[in-house]
């Protein structure tokens, strides 16, 4: 198995571009293999929350303290962030920023740099708060980038060109007041005064952008809000970033207006655009519906597709129900909509924390047909745990980050990769 998987990876890596790869930008012509590559390193504790790719270097963020190379017994100390070579799987020496609290989000920078967002206040000896631009060569913060986050944390990042979008539950960045969402100069961290769209009216007491994704000319945002710039947008909205100035798009859905369980006042989680930007997918938590999700129409514990350029009131193109288990992450590649959480089933609209008629087992990870909304046969399995918190599709395959150690019936501690066959 090792020889076959390694040769597949080597062939796939010939296709890996030298520029930035990120979820929502990489098209696959087929579904990835269900056999993970054997070269990915192991994260020995905690959880992986975020993955990005800078050239041929994978950067991994989360809440952890120890990693090791595949096939090695040497344990390496890494505080909430580390990097490894995509081709060999070897942990990059020297990249040891020593962030003092968890990393929730990552985005590739220009050249040899990476943005990290999260809950930290320091990177080694340097004081920074919630957002840093780090050099891959030595892990040090880049001089000149200054964007401390105030009153909260960063949960999501997306960069295109000279612009960096930041989401979280903060109340300010740098010297500017911004509630939960901001656009920065990617080089300096200065807040863009021309982008001041404000999420508002939380469901749970604190306005928060949970996730964001960039399409061709739209920014999708979800989280704990019910308005964007005062317009009704319950938990999900689109921003036209191609307009000058950017504005809330004429697109809205009430799909997430209903309540799920009381402990989940806001239940939207991951979202991702298709490579061509024409549609996007959203996944949720929320708990099993008491009367059955199909009967109530609630979107608790689901994956759903929405069309980007529909106007006015929009309904999901399809909805796939887990039947009571959370989904946290999604990656759309054109060939599949990959979903991850701690789910037991897909195709389970009548399940109530159980397998209803038509349910298929997809423990911890699965793939959905982009057009039909039905589960694909792809079923590598993973130990469920809390769930998949990070996907990254790139031209060589699909990277996965979670809190468990079994992926595709093999030992892959918290990081794994499924190659394109």
Image (spheres, grey):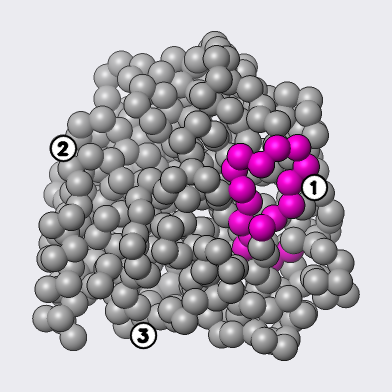
Element assignment for label 2 = loop
Between discs 2 and 3, the one toward the N terminus:
2
Q: Where's the N terminus, which quadrant?
A: bottom left
Give x and y (percent) for residue 356: 73, 86
Please, is residue 38 above or below residue 109 in the view? below
Please tell me how crowded label 3 is: few (under 14), some (14-19), or many (20+) other residues with Cα within 10 Å: some
Residue picked out by circle 3: 409
Which one is closest to the eye, mark 3 or mark 1?
Answer: 1
| Residue 159 inside the magenta-drawn segment | no
Residue drawn at (47%, 81%) of the image: 377
Which one is closest to the eye, mark 2 or mark 1?
Answer: 1
Please, is residue 368 above or below residue 120 in the view? below
Q: Where's the C terminus, which quadrant?
A: bottom left
Residue drawn at (70%, 37%) of the image: 311
Element assignment for label 1 = loop
Q: As rendered, which of 333 and 114 lies closer to the eye? A: 333
Please, is residue 295 above or below residue 206 in the view? below
Residue drawn at (80%, 34%) of the image: 232
Report how many numbered discs are placed on residues in the image.
3
Where, by quadrant of the figure, is residue 300 drawn? bottom right
Between discs 3 and 1, the one toward the N terminus:
1
Q: CA distance from mark 3 to mark 1?
A: 39 Å
Element assignment for label 3 = loop
Residue picked out by circle 2: 137
Between discs 2 and 1, the one toward the N terminus:
2
Q: As drawn, is 43 to the left or to the right of 356?
A: left
Residue picked out by circle 1: 254
Q: As drawn, is 200 to the left or to the right of 18?
A: right
Q: Which residues are magenta?
A: 300-317
């Amino acid at each position: 198995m090792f020889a076959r998987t390694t040769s597949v990876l080597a062939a796939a890596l010939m296709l890996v571009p030298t520029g930035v790869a990120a979820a929502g930008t990489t098209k696959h012509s087929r579904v990835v293999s269900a056999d993970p590559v054997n070269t990915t390193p192991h994260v020995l504790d905690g959880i992986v929350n975020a993955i990005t790719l800078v050239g041929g270097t994978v950067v991994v963020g989360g809440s952890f303290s120890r990693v090791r190379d595949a096939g090695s017994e040497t344990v390496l100390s890494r505080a909430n962030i580390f990097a490894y070579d995509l081709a060999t799987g070897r942990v990059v020496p020297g990249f040891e920023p020593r962030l003092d609290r968890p990393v929730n989000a990552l985005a590739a920078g220009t050249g040899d740099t990476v943005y990290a967002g999260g809950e930290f206040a320091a990177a080694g000896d340097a004081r920074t708060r919630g957002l840093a631009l780090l050099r891959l060569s030595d892990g040090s913060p880049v001089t000149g980038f200054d964007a401390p986050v105030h009153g909260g944390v960063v949960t999501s990042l997306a960069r295109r060109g000279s612009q960096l979008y930041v989401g979280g539950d903060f109340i300010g960045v740098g010297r500017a007041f911004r509630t939960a969402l901001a656009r920065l100069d990617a080089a300096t961290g200065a807040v863009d005064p021309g982008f001041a769209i404000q999420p508002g009216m939380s469901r749970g007491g604190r306005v928060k952008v949970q996730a964001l994704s960039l399409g061709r000319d739209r920014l999708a945002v979800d989280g704990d809000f019910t308005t964007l710039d005062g317009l009704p947008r319950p938990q999900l909205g689109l921003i036209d970033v191609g307009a000058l100035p950017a504005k809330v798009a004429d697109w809205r859905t009430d799909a997430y207006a209903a309540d799920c369980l009381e402990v989940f006042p806001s239940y939207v989680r991951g979202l991702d655009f298709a490579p061509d930007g024409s549609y996007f997918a959203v996944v949720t938590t929320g708990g099993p519906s008491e009367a059955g999700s199909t009967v109530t129409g609630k979107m608790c514990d689901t994956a759903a597709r929405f069309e980007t350029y529909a106007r006015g009131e929009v309904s999901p193109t399809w909805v796939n129900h887990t039947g009571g288990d959370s989904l946290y992450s999604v990656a759309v590649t054109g060939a599949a909509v990959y979903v991850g959480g701690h789910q037991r089933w897909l195709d389970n609209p009548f399940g109530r924390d159980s397998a209803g008629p038509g349910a298929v087992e997809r423990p911890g990870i699965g793939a959905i047909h982009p057009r039909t909304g039905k589960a694909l046969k792809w079923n590598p399995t993973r130990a469920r745990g809390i769930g998949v918190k990070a996907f990254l599709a790139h031209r060589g395959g699909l990277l996965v980050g979670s809190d468990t150690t079994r992926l595709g019936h093999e030992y892959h501690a918290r990081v794994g990769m499924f190659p394109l066959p």
